[in-house]
Image (tube, helix red, strand yellow):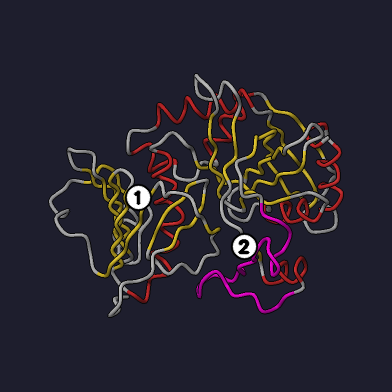
Amino acid sequence: MATDEAPARRRHAIYGTVFESDFPFAHRLAAADGPPELTFTHRPGRAGGWDDEAPVWSSAVPGPDGGPDCVLLRRPGGEELLRFGGIADFRLDGERIDGWVLDARRAWLAELRFLGPVLAYWLERRGLPALHAATVAQPAAGGGARAIGLLASHGGGKSLLAAELMRRAGGEMVADDVTVVEPIGEPPGAGGFLARPASPQMRLSPEDAVRWTGRRDLPPIHRDHPKRRVPVGGPDGFGRFHGRPVPLAALYLPERRAAGGIEVTRIAPAEALLALMAHSFVARLAAGAGLQPARLATLGALAEAVPAFRLGYPDGHRTLAEVAARLARSHLWA
């Protein structure tokens, strides 16, 4: 990835964070003009001087090189390194992240790691949990906007339901796959929670991309993944992107079923906390790093402050409009 000229540095925004970087991102990111909270630089090769450090945590999932997919290393002063075997190293030091891309042919994998677990972990260290959730905002009756989060793992249908909500008047995407939540007040969460905006892009299957956008020319996420990059907002995008933090009004656990009608059932905070833990994005890494007590307190406050519901509905596209209409008619969206 080395060139004769230094790569241009640009400012982007994701998860409510402005960062400056020289990385040539393929992912559609929101442009940012404000002062950066984080800088990210990259270079070819491998981070030196870390081979003698004992791992603080290792993933049980194997990576491309046969070793752990991710290893967390830490030095006494607090400097940390996330090593993704066969892909990239990322050194985290305060408001700076340095990256090393082991193989230029896998730069797209390095990009996915940085925009996913690396940034999520950097935010977790600052008390901002990341959830596997799509989030959609809509104007509130009293002014401003409120949002709901759809908690589900990959394949859970959250993007399809979010897309249907976005088709409704006023619906704006906050996040497609990973939602970072920010506690308000003291103690954290006493004043509720904000959902931070991710990036103006969705990931949909080729069939669903055509269904919602009418376009067959959208590129795949990467060469090994069939889903398409769907731009959100702007003249070429689907729907609108909500680029500001928005109060989180409710959490839903969508469950697609083979049969039956639409069922919405509120769950108790204790059950909601278990769901939040199950749908945390980098839960094992955060726990291995020693962040679990603080993040459990934050997620517990989230479960108490924001009502959570189980949402059961038939599989397929047939009832999506009805499900979205029911959510839009609820008092949360009034």
Magenta span: predominant SS is loop
Task: Give the CA separation, mark 2 to mark 1.
Answer: 25 Å
Residue pictured at 63% horizontal, 43% vertical: 151
10 Å neighbourhood of mark 2: few (<14), some, or many (≥20)?
A: some
Looking at the picture, tell me which residue is in the foreground, 274 or 184. Answer: 184
Looking at the picture, tell me which residue is in the foreground, 310 or 163. Answer: 163
- Closest to the camera, between mark 2 and mark 1, is 2
- Asked if 162 appears above or below 300 in the picture, the reply is below
Which percent across, then down, holds residue 49? 14, 55
- Quadrant in the rendering for residue 334: top right
Residue pictured at 65% horizontal, 66% vertical: 230
> What secondary structure is found at the residue carrying circle 2?
strand
- In reply to whether residue 223 is colored magenta, the answer given is yes
- Asked if 42 appears above or below 185 in the picture, the reply is below
Which percent across, then down, holds residue 317? 80, 59
Report whether 251 appears left or right of 93: right
Which percent across, then down, holds residue 331? 82, 31
Image marks 2 and 1: residues in contact by CB distance under 8 Å = no
Residue pictured at 44% horizontal, 40% vertical: 283
10 Å neighbourhood of mark 1: few (<14), some, or many (≥20)?
A: some
> What secondary structure is found at the residue carrying circle 1?
loop
Residue stretch rendered in magenta on the structure: 215-241
Name the amino acid type tagged 1. Ser
Question: Of callouts 2 and 1, which one flags the residue occurring earlier in the amino acid sequence?
Answer: 1
**Residue annotated with mark 2:** 203
- In reply to whether residue 290 is colored magenta, the answer given is no
**Residue annotated with mark 1:** 59
The N terminus appears in which quarter of the rendering? bottom left
Which percent across, then down, holds residue 118? 39, 51
Looking at the picture, tell me which residue is in the foreground, 149 or 233. Answer: 233
Name the amino acid type tagged 2. Arg
